[in-house]
Image: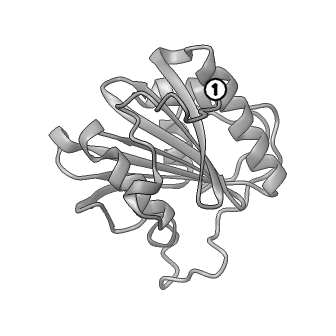
Amino acid sequence: MMQNVAQCLRIPTVGALVLTWIGCANGGNEAAAMLPEVIHGLVLSESVTGQAATEALGGIYEGEVTAGDTYIGRYGPEHLRATLYVSRFATPEDAQAELAAMADRMSSGTGGYGHHTRATVGEVVLHSVFGHGQVHYFYVSGLDVTWLASPPRLARAAIAELLHVEVDAVRDPLKAPEPTEKVEL
């Protein structure tokens, strides 16, 4: 799965990425600042940071990348595994460009992903796709591109928790939109 995510995340040259969580401090532990300890009842069981995280995603960035630019958190037991990927960019524009490139690739069915949708939830534009037995959500918030891969039965509640919104604010990706509901593709 890591390799498939890496294919969809590949972007043009990006300058050095800054990976400290502004306004968050946790005794110098950057992973703790970037990755929540629990997502919808699933406890963080493994985190990968720095160069290891960049390598785990198959070297998704072209150009200069500093160790620690990407954080990967794995949550819960294997049969309920959710994975959170967070990458911090130098500017909000760089983050938006990465999201746009990902959305373009997802819309074309790259890497075994399909059914791309986009909807505004709270203050973010939330993208969703299906692939590899999971629901995948991705969005930009400030300097960060965040990607959540989750089992379908947990996905909606997990992303609502990450976005700090009610579950009802997130359209159920397993149901077709209502005839009057506009879903951007």
Residue 58 in which image quadrant: top right
- Quadrant the N terminus occupies: top left
The one nearer the camera, 62 or 7, is 7
- In the image, what residue occupies the spot 20% across and 43% down? 80
Q: Would you place residue 159 above or below residue 179 in this image?
A: below
The one nearer the camera, 87 or 16, is 87
- In the image, what residue occupies the spot 48% across and 20% down? 113
In the image: residue 4, left or right of residue 123: left
Q: Residues within 10 Å of mark 1 (few under 14, many from 20)?
A: few
Q: How many marks?
A: 1
Q: Would you place residue 60 above or below residue 154 in this image?
A: above
Query: How does the figure colour the protein chain or chains?
Result: one colour
- In the image, what residue occupies the spot 73% across and 54% down? 89
Q: Position of residue 67 (x, y in %)?
A: 62, 54
The answer, for residue 39, to whether it is visible in the render is: yes
- Quadrant the C terminus occupies: top right
In the image: residue 3, left or right of residue 87: left
Q: Position of residue 124 (x, y in %)?
A: 64, 55
In the image: residue 70, left or right of residue 104: left
In the image: residue 58, left or right of residue 73: right
Q: Position of residue 45 (x, y in %)?
A: 26, 57
Q: Would you place residue 89 above or below residue 137 in this image?
A: below
Query: Could you tell me which secondary element the residue under label 1 belongs to?
Result: loop
Residue 12 in which image quadrant: top right
In the image as oriented, which residue stretches furthest toward the front? 180
> Residue at label 1?
185
Q: Position of residue 117 (x, y in %)?
A: 56, 31
The answer, for residue 10, to whether it is visible in the render is: no
Of the residues shown, which amino acid type is indicated by label 1?
Leu
